Image (cartoon, grey):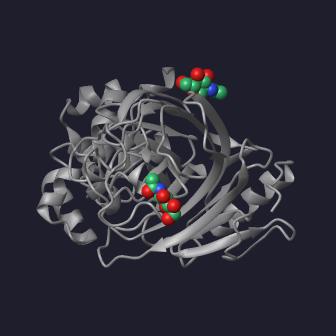
Amino acid sequence: MALEIFPIFLFVWGTLGETVDYTSNLVFDPLFYVQTNYDLQLHHLTSPSAARTHWLDYGIDEGRQACGSFHSKQYIERYPDIKIAFGATGYREAIGHFIRFQASEARLGYKEGGLDGRWTISNGNGLYLSASERMAGAVDSLVWNHKEFINAYDHGRELQMAINTDTFGECYNPTEAGGRDDGNTMGTKSRSQWVHVAGNVLQSEVLPSYWLRAESTQSHSSGGNCTRGSPALNTNDYYHYPMSKRVTIGCGGMQNCIEFISNFTIGGRWPEGFGYMQMESPTGYLAGDFTEKYSFNPETNQMIPYANNPHLPVALATTDGNYAMGAYAPGEQDTDVPMTYWAINFPSGQWNAATNKWNIVFRKHRQEDPGPHSFVYRAYFCVGTLSDVRTCLATLHGNGETLPVG
Ligand SMILES: *[C@@H]1O[C@H](CO)[C@@H](O)[C@H](O)[C@H]1NC(C)=O
Ligand SMILES: *[C@@H]1O[C@H](CO)[C@@H](O)[C@H](O)[C@H]1NC(C)=O
């Protein structure tokens, strides 16, 4: 903490007359801006440039957060010297200070412990992960090399946990971040119990919302017993048993490896007539430009074009391979059906609605007694360039993290 006070330089640079690029990727990401400031949808920010214009004209002075790794308000609250110099609402000056000095002063752009419904952790070296109150503590932002990776267009995306069954799909679907109809609100029907952040570890617990609110109907087919017009099978808006998680940046000796431990508690009476519960633990919905799908071949330690083989770890990457995320879950976990990986593209003409998904799914047979039963799963995901992700997956594999037999 002693290093957090830097009183000396504050008044000097303001006199230099240098222009500040307020749209620097240190402080602004158009995708993060529109998805986190949900109310801006009302302003029809239909392109990254419209988002940029809104940020410059209003967002900066309103103290809005415009990227996952920096928030002017949190920066001011974190560093007393910044607050003294610029005042509690000196957002514009705080942004200028961060852009100019973050590299030399090694300051962090967010408040440790969270503020105003957002909680951020980092590895102190360019990888940031955060969760929000609007998403009930689900991870809705990951920044690496100044780029937002996560699509948080609605409450069914993010990087999160969910449960459904082989036949009832979204008609009975406890979802960490919230439900379908939360998409056009500032809140969520999921009931966040707590979120704790410290250093590189984020933990949370939630009573998840069902994807469909009680007494609503499904809009498309998602399983044999859940088609267009099927009713929600839940009689409440949220599930009475918790999901919890512990997310740690840094694993297997690597800074770009993230460990995700999920704990699903399942209880009560589930609908009759399905074979198994499917636990996404977790799933990641990435930004629209992560269109390239790969599989990891554990025999050669190479990435190969997506093999549609559910037993091979998957990765999604941008076309230039400069940004990628790969998923890996060790074998020998408590699953009744072999664990699977999946990757799928969801294109859209709307710039912030297109997304690309990976998931890791464990399955347990129908539990005959109402429980509750808890199921705990370990997964990893690797972030970086496609080449970094390959190395990370190969290292996890080489560290003796056995793959499920497939
Ligand atoms: C679910 O679908 C199966 C197969 O179509 C059917 O046999 C079963 O009765 C359905 N269950 C319910 C509760 O609708
Ligand atoms: C999983 O969650 C349940 C319910 O909160 C709790 O009782 C159990 O101790 C948790 N298990 C682990 C390994 O954290």
Q: Give the side of residue 110 with respect to residue 362, left or right.
A: left
* Residue occupying the point 31% across, 34% down: 117
Residue 10 at least partly seen = no
* Residue occupying the point 35% across, 51% down: 155
Where is residue 316 drawn, in percent x and y? 58, 68
Q: Nearer the viewer, residue 194 or 258?
A: 194
Q: Give the side of residue 105 with respect to residue 59, left or right.
A: right
* Residue occupying the point 58% across, 51% down: 278
Q: Residue furthest top?
A: 2
Where is residue 168 drawn, in percent x and y? 46, 55
* Residue occupying the point 22% across, 33% down: 86
Quadrant position of the C terminus in the picture = bottom right
Q: Nearer the viewer, residue 304 or 100?
A: 304
Q: Nearer the viewer, residue 387 or 88?
A: 387
Q: Give the side of residue 11 with respect to residue 100, left or right.
A: left
Where is residue 297 drawn, in percent x and y? 79, 69
Q: Nearer the viewer, residue 56 or 370?
A: 370
Q: Is residue 377 above or below residue 156?
A: above
Residue 323 at least partly seen = yes
Q: Quadrant of ligand 2?
A: top right
